Amino acid sequence: MKLRQHWFSAIMSAIVFVFLFLPIVVVFRDAFNANKTLLTWGGFTFKWFAEALSGERFQNAFVMSLTIAIIVMLLSMIFASLGAIGMAKLPAKVRTFYESAIFLRITLPEIVIVVGLFIVARMFGLKLGPAWVVIAQTLIYSAYAAVTINARLANVSSLYEKAAMDLGASQTRIIWTITLPLLAPSIFVGGLLAFTFSLDSVVSPTFLGGPSAETIPLLIMGMIKKGVSAEVNAIGVIMSVFNILVLLIVVRFIGIRQVAGSAVKGS
Amino acid sequence: MKRHDRKLDSKGKERDGIVGAILALPDGILTLCCFAVPLVIIILYSFWKIDLTTFIVTTDWNLGNYADIAKSIYLQALLRSLLITLITVIGCILLGLPIAYFIASCKGKLQLLLIGAIVIPFWTSFVVRTYAWLELLGAHGAITRILVGFRLLPEGTDLRYSLTAVVIGMIYSYLPMMILPAYSTFEQLDKSLLEAAADLGRRPSQAFFEIVLPSCGGGIAAGALLVAIPALGEYTIPAILGGSKTLMIGNVIASEFQTTGNYPRGAALSSVLMLAVLVILIGKEITDWRKR
């Protein structure tokens, strides 16, 4: 049996959905608005996309963002999957400790973690740059990947591993031929989560990027400071389409319910 | 025979532990070097001193940085962060619960579609979504014009760069984190209780407050925490939508490091923020433990 529907919840839901989609509609509309001031509709145009895509600053920032995101994705997949498989084999006390560390990597404010790395870099006179951004993002986003992989690991039967062990397979062989293939979908999803979080991240490149690492979110933050600009909307549409493509891939793998679960931080 | 088995078993476990440790080593080193050590350094720094003419940090142990926080603008920013977080949580509960209830009351495909509709905004560029509110809340923005039209605001009001704008942006961004856990507890609710209530002549709205809310308290509290913890340390939303008088603690920390260059004071502010989050987490642990 389902909950009984109620007119109040239906009306509120309609309002909230408008609230959730209004900003997105505005961005998409203004990305195609030929009126530069954006105050009224000035006809349909692709001008802003052309301007954004041909700008060297956008191209550099896009390449920078994508490079960082791909490296963070790959590192997160490696660290999180090894960590999750290893964690299951550790003694209970050590495992609890490790789990709390992963939980804290997700829950402590990003700004505190990033500031900590910033101080370390300054203390040892190390140069800031994209590598630091990668470290910070791998640290934080691989924890999300680890949670995703752990959830899958808890649902995978250990029967196959036990069978392989009885047949005399070595630990490495079991991990390589049984555990990893069983976990592959969740590792992939964890990596894509890290990828999208990285593309959207503001705090870590702001503090750790140095002058050389302008990512797309930083580029947008800079453009916003100068006031409303039509180009920002075009860039927003490009990045959103990119993200939603990733979302569609993820949904194909694990279904929308699991996506809803993993999108909620730390659950 | 039995003893032999047990011996083998404990040996296997030991070997398991070693393999586990080797596998977890990369992530462990990352956590230690890039997480644990920097956090300890932040705490140490917060008790040190900086000479603001030479920018040399000396390890004079003192509480001056914390004394600085206790007065003036820093305390204001801290209290403002708490206030904004509180309003955000309340706003998310008020807006989130009805929609979570509605989604739980829908069937099959429609339900999936609605969940998708909650998740999709979450996956479009966060910075741009927040920036869009600048347009909606400006003097010519849609929201401002509607409110002026209903005479709720005087003509020519600009809602940008204000506390209102920050709160709207925060509720907007964190709403899905309230809706999704609340929806899943509503979904798991024992519906026979509601049938019983209906048989006894309670109206659905009465049943909601007498049965649904009390038995879903845990899920709602979980959602509130998922909103409150990241909201407290938010940097980007007030940086985009707020003005100089509506900054949150995250922004003040940022400016201590980027503008003022007073690392020890920034470290003290970071420590306070860390402490606030830990207090919330420990409070949750204690309530969970009491329930058991």
Image (spheres, coloured by chain):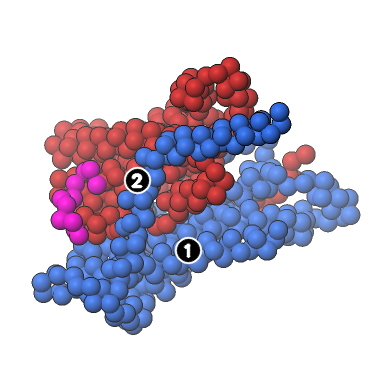
Chain colours: A red, B blue
Horizontal and vertical percent position of residue B49: 22, 75
- Most distant residue in the top direction: A167
Is there CB contact under 8 Å for labels 2 and 1? Answer: no
The answer to whether any part of residue B78 appears in the image is yes
In the image, residue B250 above or below residue A221: below
Horizontal and vertical percent position of residue B131: 33, 51
Residue drawn at 39 percent across, 57 percent down: A109
Horizontal and vertical percent position of residue B191: 78, 45
Residue B268 sits inside the magenta stretch = no
Same-subunit check for callouts 2 and 1: yes
Residues packed near mark 2 inside 10 Å, few (<14), some (14 to 19) or many (20 plus): some
In the displayed structure image, the side of residue A99 where residue A37 appears, left or right: left
Examine the image and state in which quarter residue B201 appears: bottom right
In the displayed structure image, the side of residue A96 where residue B232 appears, left or right: left
Which range of residues does the magenta coloring cover? A122-132
Q: Secondary structure at mark 2?
A: helix
Mark 2 belongs to which amino acid?
Answer: Leu
Quadrant of the drawing holding the N terminus of chain B: top right
Q: Which mark is residue B278?
A: 1
Q: Secondary structure at mark 1?
A: helix
Q: B186 or A18, which is in the foreground?
A: B186
Q: A19 or A73, which is in the foreground?
A: A73
The answer to whether any part of residue A31 appears in the image is no
Residue drawn at 39 percent across, 40 percent down: B25
Mark 1 belongs to which amino acid?
Answer: Leu
Q: Which mark is residue B30?
A: 2
Pointer 2 or 1: first along the chain: 2
Examine the image and state in which quarter residue B250 appears: bottom left
